[in-house]
Amino acid sequence: MEILKVTDPEFTNYGRIIEGYDDEKKQIMEALRDNTPIPDGTDYVAEEKALQDLAASDKITNSLFGGSPMQFGWCNGHNTKLNCLEYHRSSEINLGATDFILLLAKREEIVDYKLDSSKVKAFLVPKGVMVEVYATALHYAPCQAHKDSGFQVLVGLPKGTNVGMPQFTPGNQEDKLLTATNKWLLAHAESSEAKNGAWVGITGENIDIAKDI
């Protein structure tokens, strides 16, 4: 699979590079390195106190999210597979203390709540580059950018995202994709999420970039 860069024009369909904030990015990267593990698999923490309490987090909340309450967590580990794609009703902020790769597609490419994995593109995000992933971009856990090392990635989202599950009676098919607060998920049949009952909405190959890094 071709690994594009977030500096390539194709990325503008999925997100943008956030310029500036050099001091804030340095604080966040240090907190990621000092306070978050790199497991053999992939772990996600929606809100991490060591990140939440940073002055950098306050500044980002007040500027990038216009003062709306945010949570700062992380997704770290080792991963080379697609497995799932999710979307939110909001943008997501990512910043790596390491290089990492995002596998992305567009919501408008979903047809009848299914998406062919051939629509997915891979983008390398260098260490220290902060990106906004748009609400219209399908994404999931990052992938490692190098065979011999994992990833440490900030995940900035509106407060409460991915925490708990609202209780309601589904009124349409999209409602059945909701797996957590502000999280709609499409799973590949091979994924553990699908085996646990998530909507099987990814057709085609379960992409694995192990041979491409």
Image (spheres, grey):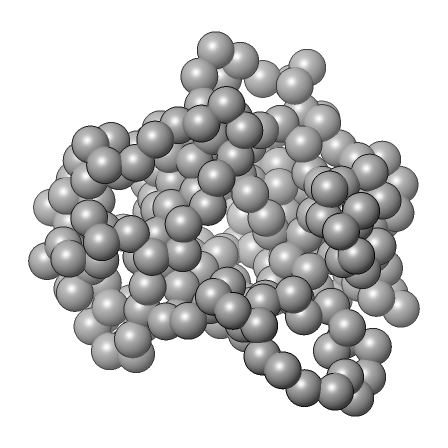
Q: Is any atom of residue 126 visible in this view?
A: no
Task: Give the quarter of the figure containing the N terminus.
Answer: top right
Residue 150 x/y as whole percent: 45, 23
Residue at x 44% of width, y 60% of height:
92
Residue 39 to residue 173: above or below: above
Q: Residue furthest top?
A: 148
Residue at x 89% of width, y 41% of height:
204
Residue 57 x/y as whole percent: 20, 59
- Side of 108 where 72 appears, left or right: left
Residue 205 x/y as whole percent: 85, 35
Write down the quadrant of residue 53 in the picture. Answer: bottom left
**Front in this rendered view, residue 119 or 148:** 148
Task: Give the quarter of the figure containing the C terminus.
Answer: top right
Residue 35 to residue 185: above or below: above
Q: Is any atom of residue 173 visible in this view?
A: yes
Residue at x 14% of width, y 54% of height:
54
- Side of 198 where 9 appears, left or right: left
Residue at x 62% of width, y 36% of height:
122
Residue 7 to residue 108: above or below: above
